Amino acid sequence: MKLAFLFPGQGSQKVSMLHSLPDHSAVGEVLQEASDVIGENIYNLDTAEALTSTVSVQLSLLIASVAVSKAFEAEGVRPDFVAGHSVGAFGAAVTCGAMDFADALKIVKLRGVLMEQAFPSGYGMGVISGLDAKSVCDMVEAIFSEENPVYSSNINAADQITISGSIPGINKVLDQASQGGARTAELLNVSVPSHCPLLNSVGDSLYDKLAHINIRSPVVLYASNRKARLIRNSEQIREDLAFNVSHPVRWYEISSLLCEYGTRLLIEMPSGNVLTNLNKKTLPGARSVSVDENGFENCFFLAKRFCS
């Protein structure tokens, strides 16, 4: 039985997420390294006020997910595959050995800064459940305007699609989706229009920076956000880390691909259980658990029992 580690993206954050990590020496080492690299007490990142910042959110998610993945590694549990959603790709890259944690911290901080600078207000993301991708794309194309741009973005499940752009444009699509039979249509707790062409310049800047970062071939397969493929090529990982910010995350295809390759246990790193809940709906043949919901010890037990 194959094991996959999953790394959540923005929207999964919660207050005190770094304070509630498992009590493990490997976690402590990661937290200390993070504080040293970014030059501040990382426990200041996960307050309610701090988490209004894209920079704090993305750093907190990276730190939390890598800390717990390192705790699993210290206990002898290593995944066969890693997959990260959006900024979660950086935690996946660190865990598979493609990238040093210190470099990931620096790039993720820059990523958050560039995203905030590009669209400081008036933009964000929404999510529609209960309609397929084509239906959502048709609505988006009909409503799009240069004044209020909106794009379809991530495909989280066959019937869960995110949209990105201006808040007025997003709200128009959400209203039409509700009238068109969507189960839910709501704004996400994300203050930037991720995974659409509005962030093309951010992707270009990240790639320029990543060109000077050592990206290695991974020791386990890495799932690409943009291509929904398992890859070992370091340059392809570099491109994925840079440009996933301006391209849709094909999560439904990624999770399905993991199962096609024999994955039967998927463990979601902190924070939250968004990816776990998606997988439970779309991957009935696999077991999906999250460290936040099920606890580190229980997840460790499942990994040792079913994947040794």
Image (cartoon, rainbow, N blue to C red):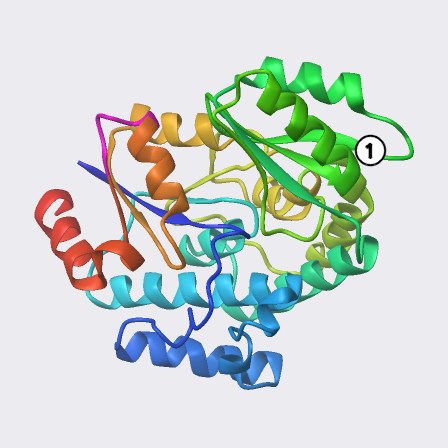
Determine the main secondary structure of the stretch shown in magenta. loop
* Residue at the spot 51% in from the left edge and 77% down from the top edge: 34
* Residue at the spot 23% in from the left edge and 32% down from the top edge: 286
Residue placed under numbered mark 1 in the picture: 149
Q: In this rendering, would 306 be left or right of 44?
A: left
Name above or below for residue 61 compared with residue 85. Answer: below
Residue 19: tell me if it is visible.
Answer: yes
Q: Which residues are magenta?
A: 282-287
Pick whichever, 55 or 36, lies toward us. Answer: 55
User: How many marks can you see?
Assistant: 1
* Residue at the spot 54% in from the left edge and 85% down from the top edge: 36
Residue 290: image location, x then y, percent? 29, 51
Q: Identify the image quadrant of residue 278.
A: top left
Name above or below for residue 49 compared with residue 152. Answer: below
Q: Identify the image quadrant of residue 108.
A: bottom right
Residue at the right extreme, as displayed: 147
Pick whichever, 32 or 222, lies toward us. Answer: 32
Name above or below for residue 31 compared with residue 161. Answer: below
Residue at the left extreme, as displayed: 305
Q: Identify the image quadrant of residue 236.
A: top right
10 Å neighbourhood of mark 1: few (<14), some, or many (≥20)? many
Residue 271: image location, x then y, percent? 41, 59
